[in-house]
Image (cartoon, coloured by chain):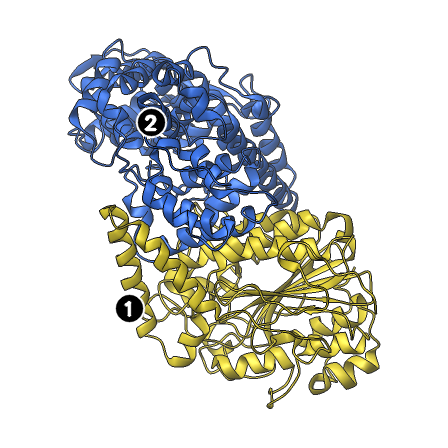
Amino acid sequence: MAREYPEEFSGTALQAAVAATRFGYGAAPGDIARLTEDPITAVAAQVRDVDPLPAPLKDLPDTRALLVDTLRARRRGRTAFQTYRREARARAVSAVNAHLQAAASSPNQFFERLVAFWTNHFTISMNKPAVMPLVTAFEREAIRPNVMGSVHDLLLAVVRHPAMLIYLNNVRSVGPNSKQGRASGRGLNTDLARAILETHTYGPEGDITDGDVVTLAGLLSGWTVGLLGEAEEGAFRFRSDWHESGAKRFRGRFVPEAGLLEGEAALDLLARAPATGRRLSRLMAQFFIDDDPAESVEEAIYDGYTDGGSARGMAEGLLASSEAWTETQTKVKTPRDLAVSAARALGRAEDGAGIAHAMRAMGEPPYQATDAAGWPIETAGWIAGEQFFDRLDWCRGLAEQAGAAPGFNAIDCAFEAVGGLLREQTYRRMRVAFSQQEALALFFSSPEFQLR
Amino acid sequence: MKGARISRRGLLAGAGAVGLIGAAGTSRLSLAAAPTDKRLVVLDLQGGWDGMGMIAPYGDDAYAQARGELALRTPNQVNGVVDLNGFYGLHPAAEALLPFWNDGQLALLPAVGVGTNQTDHTTARAWFETAGSGEPGASGWLGRALNAMEAADTAVMAVGAEGGLLAGASAQRIGRAGDPVSALAAFEQRVALLYAETPLLAAAFEEAVAARNTRLNRLANDDRDSDAGAAILGDAPWLAEQAAQALSESEAHRVAVIALGGWDSHQDQGALVGPLPRRLAALAQAIALLAEALAPVWDKTVILIASEMGRAVAPNALAGTDNGVGGMALMVGGAVSGGVYGAWPGLAPNARLDGRFLAPRNSLWSAVSAILQDHLGLSPRIVANSILPNFGDTQRLEDVIA
């Protein structure tokens, strides 16, 4: 017999449902009961003393090993390199599956969603062939260890990472007045500098001029990757002979000639700028709460940021705002969110490959954003036009399959997945459905499951 | 093969019965027992599959210009295809197929035709299903093959109204499930009721209905019928799992036909992202699921992926593609010897059929003939005389079955 709809849900039961739905990917069976005693404390604990590399990610190769592999393959000639690429891609897809499994199965759901936020904010993509093998290593090495640190450490780790230097072409950037530049006539590549200013920090509202971009590119010139046989083979390398010479003036600040330290000083300036903090706070509020979040939520996040430019402070500030805990759901789940939440609701969080399939089918192939801006933070676009039917169709197909399991009960599944967010009208429709499959399909299609 | 044990589990319940499985969109699954230990799955892509949208012949000098806004980028470019052999590249949405290529278990059959140059679905489907022009009462080629294998008296599950490739197979049929399209419509209506108090989703639902109606209203009747209620994103993985279960070691079934609608991409099909790539992802997932679930019998398995027609080379005014002639077919399986089978006719306007269509340089029936003879063990004489009489002279592909 299916559960009756309760007279009422206790306040903390409702808060627990919000905690799992909004700050995690969605509840797995048993989660809401576990969170109910003290939801706020329980979510805060999901970012305290967390091992940034859960079990599925422990044994994946690091960037140096992957890059050395690529560099060696390149030496073996065209056909061998093509074979390497095909095999490397299959390995990269396996690593992506492991990351999706890790995100879906971690008990530290809030941490995992912060990782997703920052990984998307500092997008690199498999869609660039040279970066394809490295996308998950970038997350493991630059993002995960720093999401609970300072924005400055995070930004520095991201910009220094070989994957980012390759993705945005800084490995080819040579100061025109450097030793190498004067000898070869090579020049700056501004892709990374532009992304740092326009995407990673100040953003489009930041009054960025082309001069700022060129200056930052000069400050970062010589930040490249060591080639085979070099001491820094497959790792970050600073080449002083590629670095633009002379003192520079960046955003009103005098930067004396100091080689590698110039770029670090510029990133420090950007990471600590109030404009950066304001923008990141808004993006985080949009990612977790609503496309148009309440100002008080942004303020709470920004308060956390001002504690020394702290990414940890931002996360804690998000939880501290009462509006962040509203039970009104207005944020459309991305394909990633929907696929992972469905996997968790069905107890299939270990199936990373299945989650990857679902994301591709719904239009968000994992780790394959089409440019450095990443996937849109505003999610209403994911249900535009007939794409909405594709999403509902995917939900129906999953329900047809999962709902056919012997003994499966869709209403039990729904209460475990969204708890007190389950509306009585959805419950009633599920009760009168023709089959468990249809009841589950209705639940997956319902507002309480489509939104967070 | 009398006395074959038929699964009684779940949806497959009912020995000897014919039931309809799937049935949400135009999709359905048919199963047949047969006296062989080999496995054959046919993924019947209904509506005319734009195979070039999945396997891009980027090495053809005319490709980028011919495909215009639908052209995918080359493997060395950002957002490019995944290189297969220096000429063909795989759409990244379908990258779940890459391991099969790497393992030599994916065969590309480029520029295949079914025997007619007509571009309406009714004619093309008749040729594809019957290996002939489909006179009234004509049987499907796979139905004839099963009869030739003396698979009679075994259950052929499923079927829908006409029976498609399996039409004419000797089997009992009882009943017929309800109209699949109205079943899907009814589901959508029940979903819409859930959105009454959620303006965001209610508006999205209405917008989706309007977008679909606008698209369907632009189509000719023949195309509209081919589109009706296609639901591959949901159906492909689910039907693949059902098929794999029925074809697994412990069950009697040996042949499965999974019909998947949703390929008649007349409008806004998308190149790197969009409706077609989402469907390619679902198709690739279905193949990956079949391989995973059939692992114990994988070396005895062939999956044929084919459609009744290809699509016009160039995009139309609505950023889709019109019905075409030459198309793509694929074979995947442990019993498949991977590679490219068949010459590429070229995409330059003067190489095309009527200046518009990929020339059907290769015959789908040469691949089917190889499957019937080298995989299912039918004799050349039976294949030529009884199963593919209209293509008796067609040479089978000699090496495609491992």
Q: Secondary structure at mark 1?
A: helix
Give amino acid for label 2: Leu
> On what subunit does the disc labeled 2 rest?
A
Q: Quick one: quadrant of the N terminus of chain B?
A: bottom right
Which image quarter: residue A101? top right
- The residue at 75%/76% (across/down) is B145
**Residue B363 pos. (x, y %):** 65, 76
User: What colour denotes chain A?
Assistant: blue
Could you say which chain is coloured yellow in the image? Answer: B
Report the side of A226 relative to A307 (left or right).
right
Q: Secondary structure at mark 2?
A: helix
Task: Name the one closer to the observer, A350 or A422.
Answer: A422
**Residue A319 pos. (x, y %):** 30, 19
- The residue at 73%/78% (across/down) is B170
Residue behind mark 1: B214
**Residue B334 pos. (x, y %):** 74, 54
> Up-down: is A321 above or below B39?
above
Q: Which mark is residue A14?
A: 2
- The residue at 47%/83% (across/down) is B354
> Up-down: is B387 above or below A180?
below
